[in-house]
Amino acid sequence: MRILNALRADMKFQFKQGFYFVYVILTLFYMIVISQLPNEYAKYVVPIVIFTDPSFVGFFFIGGLVMLEKVQGVLQCLVVTPLQPLEYLLAKVISLAVLAEAAGFAITLVAYREGFNWPLLFIGILLTSIFFTLYGFIATNGCNSINQYLIKMLPYMLILTIPTIIYFITPSLWVLQLVPSVAGLNLVYGAFNGIALVEAVMYICYLVTLNVLFFIKVEKSFMKNMVKG
Amino acid sequence: MSIINKSTSFKADIKTVMRDPILVMFFMLPAFYPILFKIVVKIITPIIYDYFSVNLVDYYGYILSFSILMTPLMLGSVAGFLMIDERDSKIQELIKITPIGYKGYVINRLMLPFVGSFMYSIVAYLLINIYKIDLLALLLVSFVAGLQAVLIGYLLYTLAADKVQGLTYAKGFGVFSIIAMADIFNINWFTIIASLTPFYWITKLIVDYSLFTVVAALAVNIIYLLILLITTKSYRYK
C-alpha cells in the first residue's frame, strides 16, 4: 500500500512537472517524422528512436528528481516515515518505466504500420528503462545539486553510448553485446526486426541480473550518500 | 542604464559562468561537438548509402543547420538555467533595486547566449565543413542563431518554475530541431506551421538563400523578439 501511494505521488509530481506533456509533444513530432518514412526504413528508425528517447528517459530525469528532493529536504523527511528506501526507489523506477512504456508504445502504435513483437518490445523498454534509471541513481552519488548531476551525466552517458555507436557501425564485434545498452538496443530492435529466442532470453536474463545487482547497490548507497550524506 | 553598468554586469555574468562547472562545460561543448558531428557524418554516409541507397550528401545542408541549431539550444538552456538559479536564490530581488534593474538584468543574461551562439555558429560551420554558403549568409545564420538562443533562454526561464521543470522543457525544446528540418518531411501543413516559427529559418537560410528568405527570416525572428521584449516589460512590473 505504501509503495502504491509513493508511486501515485511520483506520477502526480511528474505529471505536474510536465513530463507527460512534453512526451505527448515529442511523440507527436516523432509520429510526423516516422509516418513519412517508407516501412522498410521505419523498422530501423522506430527501434532507434524508442531506444534513444523513451527507454533513456529515466537516466535524464532521475538526477533532477532526486536532487530536487534532496535540496528541498524531502529525502531527510522520508527517513522518519515508514516508507523504506527500497519502496522509494521502486516507486521512482516504476513511475519512470510507465512513462517510457507509454511513450514507446504511443510512437509505435501510431507511427508504425507493420506488425511487431509487442511482448518483446514491452520487456525491452521495461528492462532498458529500469537499467537507465538505476544507472542515473548511481550517477547521483556524491552530487549535491542538479548542476553537479548534469556534469556527471555526460561521462556516464558516454560510457554507454560510445560502445553502442561502435556496435551500430560494426555489429560483428560480439563483445560489445555485453554492454547493457547494446543488450537493451538488441531487444528493442529485435521486437521489430526479429531475434532468435535463445538470444532474446539471454539478453533478458542478462539485463534482469544487472538490474537486480544495480538495485542492491543503489539501495545501499542511497541510504549512505543521499539520505545521511 | 549606462554603458559602464552594462559592461560590469556582463563581466559579472562571465565570472558566474566560470564559477559554475556545468555552465563552463556547456559553453565549451559547442566548440567540440561539430568535430564529433563531422566524424559521425563521414562514417555513416557510406553505411546509410550501402543499407538504404540514400545519399546523405544531398542532406548535408540540413545536417549543417541541425548542428548550428544545437548551439542556441545549448547556450539558451544554460542562460535559462542560470536565471532560474538566480530566481531561486532571490538574487533577482536584489538586482531589481540596483541601477541595472530587471530589464537590464534580463538583457545582460541573454547577451551571453546571443554572443556565444553567434560566434559558435561560425566556428561550427568552419569545423564541420560539409556544405558551402556565402559569408553574408553565414553571418545572417549566426545572427539568427543568436536571436534564437535569446528566445530559448527566455522561454525556459519564464516557463519553468524550478530546475526539474527546466530539464523537462529543455528536453521538450528538442522538437525545435525537428521543426527546423520541416522541408525534408514534405508535409505542406507542417512546413507552413514550421515557417511561422523562427527555428525553420536557419535551415532555409542555409539551403535556400534568397532575398525573400533573408527578409522572412529576419521578420519572423524580430517579431518573436519583440513579443519577448513586450513580455519582459510586463513581467518586470509584476
Image: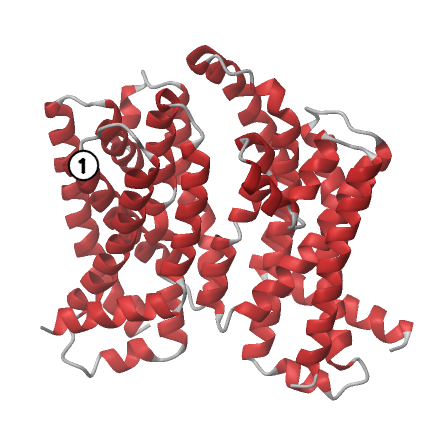
Q: Quadrant of the C terminus of chain B?
A: bottom right
Residue A100 visible in the shown view: yes
Residue at image location 35% in from the left, 23% down from the top: A39
Q: Which residue occupies the extreme right position in the image? A: B3
User: How many C-alpha atoms fall within 10 Å of the one at disc 1: few (<14), some, or many (≥20)?
Assistant: some
Q: Residue at image x 84%, y 37%?
A: B211
Can you give x and y, in whole percent of width and height, for residue A213 in the image?
17, 49
Q: Residue furthest bottom?
A: B97
- Give percent across and percent down for residue B58: 62, 20
Left or right of B2 on screen, residue B86 = left
On screen, residue B18 versus residue A3, left or right, reads right
Q: Where is residue A5 in the image (x, y as percent from the top left)?
A: 17, 73
Question: B25 or A101: which is nearer to us?
Answer: A101
Name the residue tied to disc 1.
Answer: A118
Q: In which quarter of the image is the N terminus of chain B?
A: bottom right
A59 lies above or below A228: above
Q: Which residue is drawn at 15% across and 49% down?
A: A212
State left or right for residue B110 relative to residue A90: right
Give the residue type at disc 1. Trp
Q: Is B105 located above or below residue A187 in the figure?
A: below
Q: What element carries label 1?
A: helix
**Residue A190: percent from the left, percent from the top?**
23, 27
Of A172 and A189, nearer the camera is A189
